[in-house]
Amino acid sequence: MNPRLRICFTSAAAICLVAGPALAQKNVSLTNVKFTPAAIIAGTNTTLSITFTNPTGAAIDNVTFVDTLPVGMTSIALGAEPFGPGCGADGNVSVDTATVYGHVSVSAGSNCTVEALVTVASTGLYANGPSNISGFNGNPLAFSADTLAVGDSHAYQGLWWATSGLESGWGINFAQQGDQIYATWYTYDTSGKAWWLSMLASRTTPTSNAYTGTIYVDRGPPFDNFVGTANSFVVGSGTLTFADARNASFAYDVNGVSQTKAITLFDLRTGTAPVCVYSLDTPDFAAATVYQDLWWVPNGAESGWGVNFAHQGDTLFATWFTYNADHTPLWLSALVTREGTSSTYSGSIYQNSGTRFDQFDASQVVANPVGQAAFTFSAGNPATFEYTVMIAPFPGPVTQSKPLTRFLFAGSGGTVCE
């Protein structure tokens, strides 16, 4: 009797795969599962890819697996190209509502990727990892789970800058929740000092791609002793108009100066750029694996300052908006990288100076290192911000630690990026 496991492409496929005699372990690894895109609107599709790696010099046949999808996720068809280039001819994969299953042949020294279309009807975060895999006759499973974010609408959340980097040195960060965008604009005042402004912009109509609001400048307690509250002062108005998910215009009138800037989503080039979706129901942020959002001290205990994160791969670009010793706006930035496989990201903090916002000259921007930052995340929320900075006019270094959590300014719902 042939002891090889029999593959059945019926509704009982999972039973067929595990009921027969166990196959000898093969020197092949299941190295990756991935959703593309990693964030979708409820009821639409994404592609699930499953990758097998053969490190040997000979093809390995009959590599079996069953991927039991997260509860609420449904497999609907094989992908447009169900077998990648590294897959041999002796393979057969199918889908059965809640599973993707079958067997593959992996060419010598190659990766074999199989694809299936999946969908989810309800908003939330859906993780697919080693615990979802059964019937695999290769090496022990050690890959990282991938998470799919499912929302009610797309969001423009992230760090944006002048198109093509033509005015490198300033930027504007968006945190979007439903029909509102909280914008934090990092630029320079008329003296060239780093200066931040903010705007809560609302969608102009239910179907519009434009958001408009009042622009404010804040004054608040110095960051080393944040006691009391910040005060906001109206300085103008602004309108954000989006051409698509990556391109927009920023029109503003600030202190009598009217300008329009073409802006685009900033690419850190340190990994796949995340996709962000908003859900009417508040997501389980603890399950999120991407930290791209606006964060502040829990419960608004130090309302008036915060940190924006742009997140790609193992890198975060953090922009910290706060106040100097004279209570005027101060912003600092840090490009921080992950420490090994930990949940801590660390790097140098910089203080910028440049030319005034209405006569911007990128060649005049200077970034001065002023300290060190470390952000440690407890799952997807909350986090701890530890820093040491030395900036004028403080007489010495300031070392502090602050708790952070995501800022939910809309009152209900929330945005996640994956």
Image (cartoon, grey):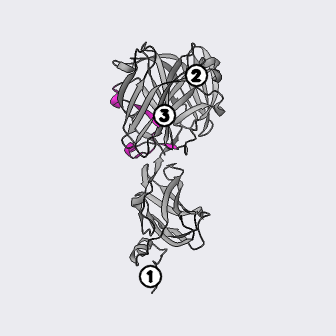
Residue annotated with mark 2:
366
Kindly report which numbered mark, 1 or 2, lies closer to the viewer in this rendering.
Answer: 2
- Asked if residue 278 lies in the magenta stretch, the reply is yes
Q: Along the polypeptide, which appears first: circle 2 or circle 3?
A: 3
Q: How many marks?
A: 3
Q: Amino acid at mark 2?
A: Val
Dot 3: within a 10 Å radius of its alpha carbon, few (fewer than 14), some, or many (20 or more) residues? many
Examine the image and state in which quarter residue 267 appears. Answer: top right
Q: Secondary structure at mark 2?
A: strand
> In the rendered structure, which segment of residues is drawn in magenta?
275-301
The circle drawn on residue 175 is 3
Alpha-carbon span between mark 1 and mark 2: 70 Å
Residue at x 44% of width, y 35% of height: 346
Q: Secondary structure at mark 3?
A: strand
Is any atom of residue 409 visible in this view?
no
Q: Which residue is mark 1?
A: 3
Camera-side residue of 274 and 394: 394
Q: Hey, what amino acid is under mark 3? A: Ala
Comparing 167 with 215, the one in front is 167
Q: CA distance from mark 1 to mark 3?
A: 57 Å
Quarter holding the N terminus?
Answer: bottom left
Judged from this view, the residue extending furthest toward the front is 57
User: Is the residue marked by circle 2 packed among few (<14), some (14-19), or many (20+) residues within 10 Å?
Assistant: some
Give the residue displayed 59% in from the left and 31% down from the top: 161
Q: Dot 1, crowdedness within 10 Å: few (<14), some or many (≥20)?
A: few
Mark carried by residue 94: none
Q: Amino acid at mark 1?
A: Pro
Label whose residue precedes the other's in the sequence (1 or 3) = 1
Residue at image location 62% in from the left, 63% down from the top: 85
Q: Say if 40 sits above or below 367 in the image.
A: below
| Front tag of 2 and 3 | 2
Q: Position of residue 358 (x, y in %)?
A: 62, 18
